[in-house]
Amino acid sequence: MREYQVDLGFEADIFDLVFEGFWEVYTFKAQIPEVSAKKMQAWIPKIKLVCNDYTPKVQEGEDEAAEEVQMTPISAYVRIKLAKAKPEMEEDEEGNLRPSNIPEEQLEDVPAEDKCLSIITQQNGKSLIVSNEAAGRYFRYDLIKEMSVSIEALKGLDLSEFNSKCDAEANRLENEFCKLFEDEPSNESRLPRIPVFDFRPAL
């Protein structure tokens, strides 16, 4: 993502700022005076870093990563979207009830019961990239809430309005990220050309 931060619309050096900030918090070395070690201890349990079979192993005392692991080629990108409320019925000119023509994007989101849905991403020799809109959204809400309490400059923030703005920016970012996989002449990224599928659970 760092390589394509300009294509994704990031400001200069913003990726490094977030990346380094994460590790400062995770290693209890935050540079922000308002964030004490005690506050960081409350954040750390929300983060779970897991090594899988494809994570290069480094033995104790080694400076370089082990031999590169051959990963399964990616077959597709799947986006798990939040379910939407069913559109209300409305009468047409003849008095018949039909679903309203409100665009799906404008329908109300249905709160997810499972905020960290587990998805199988590798099976039968095939590998998928999977993003879960609910997981990203609710983690982001928790993080914003914690930061608004801990950081003086963010106190008094209208969380509802700020969350809505962050949701819109997250959707924009994901759409731009998906374009990096498009099989289009204008796409100069080195990422594989794979299809992108959206799945929205039906109620």
Image: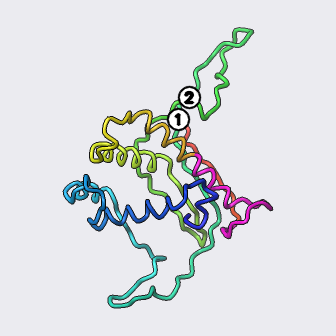
> In the drawing, what numbered circle is on residue 179?
none
Residue denoted by label 2: 86
Pick whichever, 31 or 92, lies toward us: 31
Q: Above or below — where is 171 with respect to 187? A: above
Q: Residue 190, position in %: x, y? A: 68, 70
Residue visible at 41% across and 33% down in the picture: 160
Residue visible at 72% across and 59% down in the picture: 182
- How many C-alpha atoms fall within 10 Å of the one at disc 2: few (<14), some, or many (≥20)? some
**Residue furthest to the right:** 185
Tell me: 31 left or right of 123.
Answer: left
Residue denoted by label 1: 203
Q: Which amino acid does label 1 sit on?
A: Leu
Q: Quadrant of residue 95?
A: top right
Q: What residue type is labelled 2?
A: Lys
Q: Residue 148, position in %: x, y? A: 32, 43
CB contact under 8 Å: marks 1 and 2:
yes
Q: What stretch is highlighted in magenta?
A: 172-192
Tell me the chief SS of the magenta region. loop
Residue visible at 40% across and 42% down in the picture: 113
